[in-house]
Amino acid sequence: MRALVVEDEAALRERIVKRLEASGWAVDSAADGRDGQWMGEEYPVDVAVVDLGLPERSGMQVIRAWRAAGRRFPVLILTARDRWQDKVEGLEAGADDYLTKPFNMEELLARLRALVRRAAGWADSVLAVGPFELDTARQELRRAGEPVVLTAFEYKLIEYLMLHAGKVVSKTELSEHVYAEEMERDSNVIEVLVGRLRRKLDPQRALDPIETLRGRGYRFRAPEGGAE
Amino acid sequence: MNSLRTRMVAVASLVLAAFLGVTGVALERAFHDTGLELVRERLQAQVYGLLAAAEPGPGKAFSLDGLPEPRFTIPDSGLYAAVKDAGGGTLWRSRSLLDRDLGLPPPAGPGEPRFSAAPAPWGEALFALSYRVRWELPGGGERVFDLHVAESRREFDARVARFRRDLWTWLAVLAVGLLLAQAVVLTRGLAPLERLARELRAIEAGKRDALSEDQPQELRALAANMNHLIRFGRRALERHRNALADLAHALKTPLAVLRGAAEDAGTSDAGLARTVLEAVARMDESLSYRLRRASAVGEPTLGAPVTVAPLAARLVATLSKVYADKGLVLDTAVPERLQVRADAGDLTEILGNLMDNACKWARTSVRLAIAAGPGGEGLEILVDDDGPGIPPGERARILERGVRADERMPGQGIGLSLVRELAVDHYGGAVRVEDSPAGGARLRVRLDVRST
């Protein structure tokens, strides 16, 4: 998952970025409203964390600009103002949740995961597709109740694919959302890693949960009555 | 009734009545006096006419050589004359008098004519002039005799009555005219004040931002000052709230950094981390409480009333996003046209904290009902949830500042105590915790505000 953090206080921004990266997110960050707005418009963002009191352009203006430009990714407002009128105005500007400073880092992570999950159309924190269950809160994958051991990167791949279960995900899209830096992106590596993931998910090659669509990308099997 | 118009009408009417009354009486009197003077002069002229015609002889002989006025010869004509000697014996009387006596006393002396207004013995009202003459006879010696001339009052009285009728009729017409003119003057004169009052009502109703500047000279300074006051009030409130928001930002961002650092240090120095986290939490709570309380303003003096329904709808939309994962049913019952004279920010704060608290505890649904209080007095807010409810022993305590009924729910403490403080201190209201028919807690908040 790719997160955008827009926060002017350097110490806080770095801490959030570090913590997100440690739990497997690809993170972009900006120190003012203008850069933040540009990144949100140009980067493949899955979720954004925006401070309201930003230099150059207020958080509220940034969120409005994104929504006006048709960017629909979920936004969490990070604010020092905890009057209800500020919260209402923030969410009306297009944000989806708010957290008041000072906040608990674990709570921030949980809220961001929930926002991404809801944006993809999943109501519950456990994504269930056939025999596969992905617990996004504990970052665990189970097959028919049995845990499947994954590397951090494999988890990133399966999380993105399962969140968008039933939809075609191109290799470019996949790499954009799981790699932090542009130069790391290599579609051959993605192919190799998806191959390894397939073997772990389906050692008997009976279920074939990840389809390959030639020239278009991958598709995790659609859930039956799960999401969307 | 205490109104400018009534006062001005009353005072002006009294002045007008007094003026017209005094004028009428004075005119009537002047007319009467002038009329009497004319009668007296006329009688004097008759006396001179009689004297010119008099032919007194010696002894009791007296004759008149041609009468100056034919009415003396017509019986009962209303003009009478008699000549008497000093002893009171009648020497001559006009034919108009027939054989009656005027019954007038003799005048005091020669050259002192006596004018009198008295009824004749036969009842007719008369004006009379008595005149004593000392007449030198051609053969030496003199005679003294009295001339009495009388005239009926009838014509004089009729003229005075006619004058009086005309006078009061015209004065009445004048009074009506002046009253009408006064009404016009008052209406035109008070129109700017009435417009000012209308504009103030429009500002209170939220239909105007300021008073118009094209006021008459006398009101221009007043209107300009009122406008300044209105604008100043709004700007001061905005500045005040912005300053508080800046302060919150300035203090809470470092607190967030501090908290993050303490969380990271948790593994290496657990004791220090716990101390710092506790201190940060206390600072945060105290800061939040004080800043939010300082933002409250209470009932605005010259601001538009707030329509409650859209405000509640916005809050519900916000809370549905925030509590999306709980899948709560948020139900509201707010009359569409209900308006209150309260600050929108304060009302949002009260409703937001109540609803947030209910959403935290509710299992499946929260209901918000707002209505004008009993008899249209104030505003009553009911928030129901189907959570575990609040035991009677805890109810008073959770409204106290910073007390948490259950440590498991963060932020519980300050929300409800803030509601209590806003409702009681800023809106003269009250907060009660009750059992909800939905099974959980019911918060009943009454605000002493004007609602329509």
Image: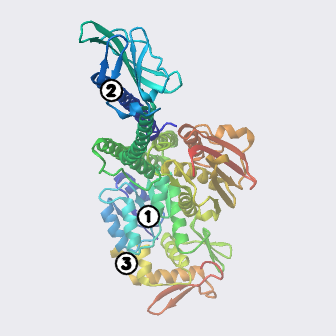
Residue extending farthest to the top is B141
Along the horizontal axis of the image, is B395 left or right of B343?
Answer: right
Question: What residue would you read off at disc 2?
Answer: B46
Name the residue type under label 3. Answer: Arg
Name the residue type under label 1. Answer: Ala
Residue A43 vs A14, above or below: the answer is: below
Q: Residue at x 36, y 30 (%)?
A: B35
Mark 3 neighbour class, 10 Å CA radius: few under 14, some 14 to 19, many 20 or more: some
Q: How far apart are labels 3 and 2 at the CA level?
A: 145 Å
Mark 2 neighbour class, 10 Å CA radius: few under 14, some 14 to 19, many 20 or more: many
Chain ID at mark 1: A
Of the numbered discs in the image, which one, if any, rests on residue A185? Answer: 3
Of the numbered discs in the image, which one, if any, rests on residue A93? Answer: 1
Residue extending farthest to the bottom is A214
Along the horizontal axis of the image, is B114 left or right of B384?
Answer: left
Evaluate whether residue B250 shows in this view: no
Nearest the viewer among B297 and B400 is: B297
Mark closer to the observer (1, 2) = 2
* Secondary structure type for disc 1: loop
Along the horizontal axis of the image, is A42 left or right of B264?
Answer: left
Evaluate whether residue A54 shows in this view: yes
Mark closer to the observer (1, 3) = 1
Q: Residue at x 41, y 73 (%)?
A: A71
Mark 1 neighbour class, 10 Å CA radius: few under 14, some 14 to 19, many 20 or more: some
Chain ID at mark 2: B
Chain ID at mark 3: A
Nearest the viewer among B79 and A84 is: B79
Name the residue type under label 2. Answer: Gln
Nearest the viewer among A99 and A108 is: A99
Along the horizontal axis of the image, is A181 left or right of B324?
Answer: left
Residue B147 vs B25, above or below: the answer is: above
| Relative image position of residue B259 (x, y in whole percent) | 46, 47
